[in-house]
């Protein structure tokens, strides 16, 4: 483990779209200024610790394929440190500004929660030093409250209050570690906060537990002075049959119920969006409209598969639509573009991990350039504005204001003999316009 | 049109499960007392005017198959009256207590909204007399804000404010007609309140328009003294690519945003639930947990089809799970079981319409008996209560109460060396228990 | 109807990617030679008569939106001629080489089949003259065996043999008309060749009927000397609950069962492929591998909708993958790229019809250029070949040849102590390679 | 491991529907004669070794939950023997006549294939003795060609011919072991016979490899005198993105391509059918119509989940429709009802495994009784026959026979002025009829 794991040690550099080299960026030019901001600051890429360093390549029908050296050995803390070395090697090779982790990704579970927490802190200390050297920052931390069998029936929503307590104590530790590492966000992904069967479930109890848990986290954030954003990551199902954080709209309702719609935002994953029956850009636009847009997990699903495939993004056009919505939302504040994506289990060479990220970074960079063109050109925005323009007329605006009534509006319809004629929605023209920005 | 349309004039009677007759009920015995209430009062069946009397049997690949006599003629109001005759004939034959309609189902569109509204009122007068004679009541009325081409881009959420105005005036009329006919609810189904493409859509504007429209309706309800419930009917999509009232969780969030979560409830349709990625019973349970359960549209989708097939329910076991959740929610108040179901377009005989409803009524009645057994027996409830029992212990309850903190909980975990062990979720036993009630 | 329907009379010309004009092609340059063939001859575009000229803009929740002048009048044959004028006006404006039609698209149904057939022939005569003038050819003809209520339970697979007879007589007429018009293919789309419920269906009877019907068609093709290809168009469902021509793999099996796997090929529609759970390129590749690739219906579905949305293609990257498979299959022989796509029902301006086709033609042209680069460059093919290279070694090739046996192979495994080690599938690198051709 | 694993040692007995005991059968009365055959001989239940004894309870988001004693220890063959003890204990407790296994379920992988094969044979010897004592038989054996990383890119369809060879040698061993144990079938489930991405795949090569592999297996069957049936198990995808054995229709086509449609049949799994977009009963009916029905894997999917959940069947009505198709197909010959179902990972008590099987056995037994009533009563069959009755008239039958032509049929249509009128498909009545058999 002393040697480098990845074959190319030099950080990938921008070489332009026509370069024929393999270990370069063709579109990601981090210092290029786009809409007044460096690409790096727009995109805020993060590598996900779990998929890249903790997943051995297994699926429900087969086990490990990767045979990573840091997964085979007897001293678990030693392996965790070796893993951290490789992780930071990849961050350096990719030259990305951020990473993200679950507590259990980075350090082994101990014989007690106290020991587990200590393990996490020990590796966090390793991180702290490396973050200094490598100039990589923490986009977010989170607690893994779903892998251990104690969480098989949920964490905050477990029928067993001791599991709730255990989860709370675990979150406290990771939230504090995240704070200490200067993390810009803290994410809650409720992997098993849902149910397998409604038959053995008390929905009112579990929703109350979840709301209270979330409030405890927010209160603790203020207590410790964490300035980052608390994010919930919606997903409709899997591993559970139903997950409470189904999608952005549902999460918004649950936040309202818990009185937290001003406190908590969402981390939207592309594949979770599509599994919930939405486009990725829809979920971003909806979150923006509801005031809860936070960050994204960038990946894609397979269009024909009904589970979370977490593939690296490949389609520039689809990705551009997502970034266009992010630009419309004002861009990220504390959020970023986290590659919650995994290489396919057949991609067993170390190079595959580098090249998959590099290709995805280029897809995003190219998509950002397209989205920025769309945004700057303004043709799309103007066409949309024109479509709603009559709403800015005073008589019409008044219908949405206090004092309007069905009676008054009905009287107007009759008085003016309103008989509104439909106007073309021009969908194909809008689509062609978007296509014209493709490069 | 003077003769009876349906072959059997006598209202269907209860004849018991072993009867071999065709035009009878085998399970629906309206005066039978179940859990202290007559079956009729539990189930509150309604026939949907649109599918049974207004739909000609077309689909996207073919036209009319039914050739109903009341759909062919030149005097549209005369045809509308003939249709009303047939409708009340079916209500009488089925001996159901309720029906439901859209304004455009019952009366033809006139040359102006004024004339259209007058047409609706004229048929409402016919209804008023027949409702007196036939002892059938109105479960709910609603406005069709999606069929006419003026609504092709939405009603409340239309980019054209005049369409908003037109829709408001139309709703005012139907809400008042519903009130005058003693309707127990008023439903808003936002057929085109959504978008075809995000590209030509301003989500913030449309969500604001929708919230304001809903408030106008609620205000008018109070103004006219309507005592019924205002209901929203969730549906994820179709005809639109995305509908804002996606599912119960999303609707709850939008109600909170509009400040209406105490004013408006949901009318949950089985097939809309499944198209949104939920089980029917999930949506009922979720609405109950959020305090917005109102009424149901009873039908089923085809398990392999991705659109709204609106089939009559056939599966007793699935239906029993829905009624169990309704019983747990305390049963209906103003709501009911509306058959928002249509016979297949190949079922072209008048008898098909009678027998489809009769079979579905029996499925529901049988399902209610099973659900009532489940509820009364209490074994399921006790098993669920036992699963959460420790949450009623004071130390655990305290974690959910004000004053709890992550710090205190974490201290407890350490002090008590909590190491919670998972307990079996016993899903298969719960399922077998449910199966044991099947009859 | 004397005036032009479309605002721009001049045929669209190639103006290059940077043109800012509206009514031009940016990528489709019909005389440009790609891989030794003119783009026009590669792509062989066809306009579908039904969506563009016969569909009024309705959907299951609303009626006509387009208000086409040729759909409103009392003399149906006059309207049919007016429609033909507009159709050929569009063909000329778009400068496409082909069109395609169902018999019922082009001419009204008469009071008898004889009269209906005569109507079809009368309009075919109109076509014959216009095809001469406009230099547009017929890609394929087909019979509409699904819209009239007589076909509600299928055509060839109807329980009523008289419907089978009627369908056979109708197909005979259209096949002959197609032959006379020089059609290059004849398509069978079994819109209602399937079932609504297995309960009322005899699967063995219906499969036999279908097989026999297909043989009758093939026999008649030879009798009349039609040189074109007979094509089946797979679709999994809709309007039926299950369609027998589910997908390419299923159709191949049914062709084998009918002894026609050398006689009949497939016309693959993109949206039908995705509804069946396949990618479009999969279905093309599978048809090529099975030796039955014929033609394509170019469109796309909505990724979140479970029905046939028949949208114009917009995604260059996805479309390029389809054309790459077509190039690998050797390109079209009698087939072509038929836009079985419809404008959205809100796209009510005549211009929308022109621009939707123009944009789609550009998407396909751009996709073809990318696919041609992929094909010509050969990097992808070489990488695939390398992956299978060891299969060309004699000892390995022998395992696939007659004479091989499990015994001999097992003996080799033991003798050579084979312990094959997995090699990276390099999916992300293949995907990145594809992405590098995007322009 | 000396003690019994399951709490109840006495085999479950039939106690009747009203019994309140837990460890009994309420519907499965193995000696009860139904349609002239004992229930046991109709249903031919089998327990699947893999889910019940080899799966530790993990899912993609969490590890082991069951903590089975036979999965923790150092001597793998000793553990395999302990597992066999428990397995036969369960077979005895459930009193089922059959079981089924993969080679890797029953014995550990050795350091070479030779050693692995020897391990399988060693445990097969254990089985042989226990099968004698316990009177349990082998429904089928199969080879696990998907779990080991060497198969990550497929077995027969691997780009590496050595993997093909390895797989062939492995199948040879299990086929022979199956033969020696008196297995009634041999199953091929092509878990990874498909592709992850079309980009790195040669479809023609892989289809040829698969066809040849299948022929090798059939040839070896004859060589060793195995009298059982070779079965293919269709599945559309998962773990692969696309599996070649997509569904029954596709498998039939591939069998035709390999010349094996008379030699190989299908083992149809309920959840695989639904994942492919079919109802379970459809796939059975289709296989029967194509002459390739063999056996079934009984389970169910979750209606809202897009992956293979392999749940125990719970819905009596759905299950009855499957058994009705099996009865129509003449019942099983060598096939049986294999519970390819797993308890939920939260069902961690040994009892859960017993009770899940017992409940499922009762669901199937009850379903069989209903299906037998439907079959014996004949009302459904008569109604279907009546629907097609006119096809038995000579003039109509002639249309399907050699000598018929489109010309002759068209002449008849004109001569007889055929104008077929649609008749009701009566779907709701058929559904109500089916419902009337529910008990």
Image (cartoon, coloured by chain):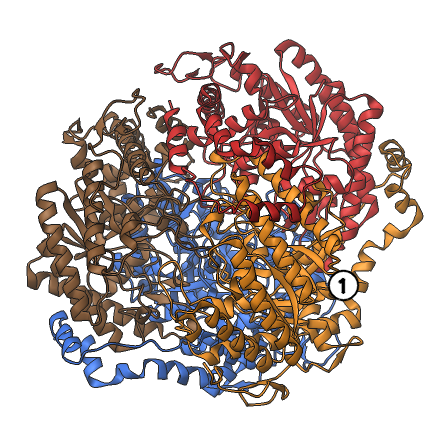
Chain colours: A brown, B blue, C red, D orange
Task: Please state which of residues A95 and D214 is positioned toward the viewer in this rendering.
Answer: D214
Q: Which chain is mark 1 on?
A: D
Regarding mark 1 in the picture, which secondary structure is present there? helix
Q: How many marks?
A: 1
Quadrant of the rendered image containing residue A236: bottom left
Query: In terms of image quadrants, where is residue D202?
Result: top right
Q: Judge by depth and name the residue closer to the eye, C93 or B399.
A: B399
Q: Nearer the viewer, residue B248 or A237?
A: A237
Residue D433: percent from left, percent from top: 71, 69
Q: Mark yes or no: residue B22 visible.
A: no
Q: Residue at x 70, y 67 (%)?
A: D182
The N terminus of chain C sits in image quarter: top right
Quarter-of-image position of residue B245: bottom left
**On the rendered structure, is B398 left or right of C334?**
left
CA neighbours of label 1 inside 10 A, class few (<14), some (14 to 19), many (20+): some
- Name the residue beneath numbered marker 1: D328
Q: Is residue D143 left or right of residue C369?
A: right
Q: Where residue B121 appears, x then y in whole percent?
A: 49, 57
The residue at the far front in this view is C415
Q: Residue furthest right?
A: D394
Q: Position of residue D300 (x, y in %)?
A: 55, 64
Q: Would residue C217 be found to the left or right of residue A316 on screen? A: right
A84 up-or-down from C348: above or below: below
Q: Name the residue: 44% across, 61% down.
A: B278
Q: Quadrant of the C terminus of chain C?
A: top left
């Amino acid at each position: 483990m002393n040697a480098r794991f990845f074959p190319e040690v030099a950080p990938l550099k921008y070489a332009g779209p026509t370069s024929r080299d393999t270990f370069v960026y063709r579109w990601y030019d981090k210092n290029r200024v786009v809409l007044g901001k460096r690409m790096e600051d727009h995109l805020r890429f993060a590598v996900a610790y779990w998929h890249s360093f903790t997943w051995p390549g297994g699926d429900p029908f087969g086990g490990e394929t990767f045979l990573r050296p840091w997964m085979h050995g007897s001293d678990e803390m030693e392996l965790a440190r070796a893993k951290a070395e490789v992780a930071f090697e990849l961050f350096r090779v990719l030259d990305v500004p951020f990473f993200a982790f679950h507590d259990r990704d980075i350090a082994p579970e101990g014989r007690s929660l106290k020991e587990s927490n200590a393990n996490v802190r020990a590796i966090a200390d390793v991180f702290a030093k490396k973050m200094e050297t490598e100039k990589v920052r923490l986009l977010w931390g989170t607690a893994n409250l779903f892998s251990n069998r104690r969480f098989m029936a949920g964490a905050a929503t477990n029928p067993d209050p001791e599991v709730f307590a255990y989860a709370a104590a675990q979150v406290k530790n990771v939230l504090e570690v995240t704070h200490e590492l200067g993390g810009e966000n803290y994410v809650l992904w409720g992997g098993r906060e849902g149910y397998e069967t409604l038959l053995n479930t008390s929905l009112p109890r579990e929703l109350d537990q979840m709301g209270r848990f979330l409030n405890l986290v927010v209160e603790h954030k203020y207590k410790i002075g964490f300035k980052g954003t608390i994010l919930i990551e919606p997903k409709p199902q899997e591993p559970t049959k139903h997950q409470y954080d189904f999608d952005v709209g549902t999460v918004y309702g649950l936040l309202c119920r818990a009185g937290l719609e001003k406190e908590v935002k969402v981390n939207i994953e592309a594949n979770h969006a599509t599994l919930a029956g939405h486009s990725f850009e829809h979920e971003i636009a909806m979150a923006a409209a509801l005031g809860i847009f936070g960050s994204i997990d960038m990946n894609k699903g397979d269009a024909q598969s009904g589970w979370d495939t977490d593939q690296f993004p490949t389609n520039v056009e689809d990705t551009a639509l997502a970034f266009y919505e992010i630009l419309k939302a004002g861009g990220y504040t504390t959020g970023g573009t986290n590659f919650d994506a995994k290489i396919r289990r057949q991609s067993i060479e170390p190079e595959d991990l580098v090249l998959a990220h590099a290709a995805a970074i280029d897809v995003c960079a190219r998509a950002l350039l397209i989205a920025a063109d769309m945004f700057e050109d303004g043709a799309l925005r103007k066409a949309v504005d024109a479509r709603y323009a009559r709403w800015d007329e005073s008589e019409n605006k008044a219908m949405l204001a206090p004092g309007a009534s069905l009676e008054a509006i009905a009287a107007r319809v009759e008085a003016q003999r309103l008989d509104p004629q439909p106007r073309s929605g021009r969908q194909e023209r809008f689509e062609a316009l978007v296509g014209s920005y493709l490069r």
